[in-house]
Image: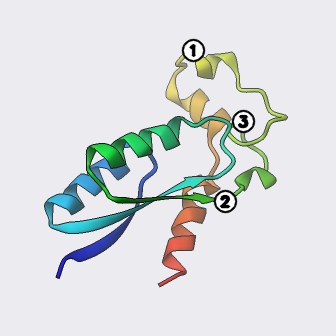
Amino acid sequence: MTKKAIILLSGGLDSATTAAIALAAGYQLIALSFRYGQRHERELAAAKKIANFLEIKEHHLIEVNLSLWGGSALTDQSIAIPQECLDQAEPPLILRKLKHPPNKSIPNSLILGNP
């Protein structure tokens, strides 16, 4: 019987690497990605490409609107994304302006709270 594992596939390097390691260990993956109110589709497009590349057959998109909390240019339409962030500014400025703390902790909580 094939072992199954759920992976949170964000589209970033960490989740892609974790997925590849799990596949190499013989797991059949169920990938979950979250649309959390972000103002772009880059993360989701990257997650889809990774799932296709790794031949993950089951990939689900879950809607969780974190924009209700505001406070981040990543999810709040009333906060302009600074041009410096768009121009590949040094990481501290990008993190300060675009960071949205719940964008990882809430999906993790949803998964951990549902056995």
Distance of mark 3 from mark 1, alpha carbons?
15 Å
Amino acid type, mark 2: Val
Distance of mark 2 from mark 1, alpha carbons?
29 Å
Look at the image and tell me whether residue 69 can be seen: no
Residue 114 percent across, percent down from the top left: 52, 81
SS state under label 3: loop
Residue at the disc numbered 2: 64
| Labels in figure, total | 3
Q: Which residue lies at the image location 19% right of the left edge and 77% below the top edge?
A: 2
Amino acid type, mark 3: Ala
Residue 73: which numbered mark, if any?
A: 3
Residue 110 relative to residue 13: left or right: right
* Label 3: how many Cα within 10 Å (few below 14, some 14–19, many 20+): many
SS state under label 2: loop
Name which quarter of the figure residue 79 lies in.
Answer: top right
Look at the image and tell me whether residue 73 can be seen: yes
Residue 10 relative to residue 4: left or right: right
Residue 6 percent across, percent down from the top left: 38, 69
Nearer-the-camera pick, 83 or 62:
62
Q: Compare marks 2 and 1 and give the one earlier in the sequence.
A: 2
Residue 87: which numbered mark, if any?
A: 1
Q: Are marks 2 and 1 in contact (CB under 8 Å)?
A: no
Nearer-the-camera pick, 5 or 68:
5
Residue 108 relative to residue 66: left or right: left
Q: Compare marks 2 and 3 and give the one earlier in the sequence.
A: 2
